[in-house]
Image (cartoon, rainbow, N blue to C red):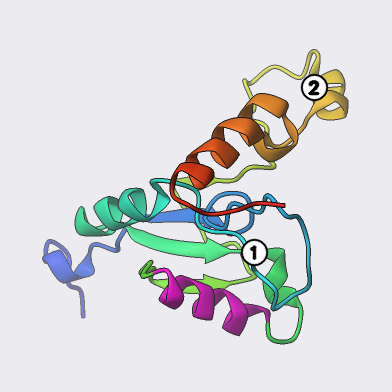
Amino acid sequence: MSNAGSMSSIPKQTIIFDFDGVIHSYVSGWQGVDVIPDPPVPGIKDVIKELRGEGYEVVVVSTRCYYDGGIEAIEKYLKRNNIEVDRVTGEKPPAIVTVDDRAICFSGKAEGLVDEIKRFKPWMKKREGLSDTVEKLRKKGLTVE
């Protein structure tokens, strides 16, 4: 039996969000699977809410999920910060786009890719990215060590 043409047969388009460094600001670095001390990246809650409101499925994917208690720790963090997503997993599902702090957007040309990979730093390791985020967190009365 086919549901061709019905709205219920059209799957939601999935957007993957990495957890550490994209949702969790991760300015303190790795503290343990269930230790997630930093606040969310400013504005990320609104982005996720807007995308879900437009009908996208938002899936959080994290290597943290490979550890016992990892999924539960992320779910607890999301709930504590009132961030609603569709699911949390360690497995990357098919998606239209991935938002990740540790990725290089491939340009279609391999030339220079080795050097780009060797020079790569996530935003929180770049001085300007970290200082901007730390300043925003301090303005909210939060401290970052």
Whether residue 109 is situated above or below residue 138 in the rendered picture: above
Q: Nearer the viewer, residue 68 or 12?
A: 68
Mark seen at residue 136: none
Which percent across, then down, holds residue 68?
74, 86
Q: Which residue is mark 1?
A: 62
Residue 109, magenta (yes or no):
no
Which percent across, then down, holds residue 120?
78, 29
Q: Nearer the viewer, residue 2 or 79?
A: 79
Q: Which residue is mark 2?
A: 116
In this rendering, position of residue 126 left or right of residue 2: right
| Cα–Cα span, label 2 and label 1 | 23 Å
Q: Which residue corresponds to the image point at 64% horizontal and 70% vertical from the top-left?
A: 90
Q: Earlier in the sequence, mark 2 or mark 1?
A: 1
Residue 80, magenta (yes or no):
yes
The N terminus, quarter of image:
bottom left
Mark 1: secondary structure: loop
> What amino acid is at disc 2?
Glu
Q: Residues within 10 Å of mark 1 (few under 14, many from 20)?
A: many
Which percent across, then down, holds residue 100?
59, 45
Magenta part, dominant SS: helix
Instruction: Specify the quadrant of the image occupied by residue 81.
Output: bottom left
Q: How many marks?
A: 2
Mark 2: secondary structure: helix
In this rendering, position of residue 113 left or right of residue 27: right
In this rendering, position of residue 94 left or right of residue 62: left
Q: Which residue corresponds to the image point at 86% horizontal and 19% vertical from the top-left?
A: 115
Asked if the residues shown at circle 2 and circle 1 are in contact, with their CB atoms under 8 angstroms apart, the answer is no
Q: Nearer the viewer, residue 132 or 74?
A: 132
Magenta-drawn segment: 70-81
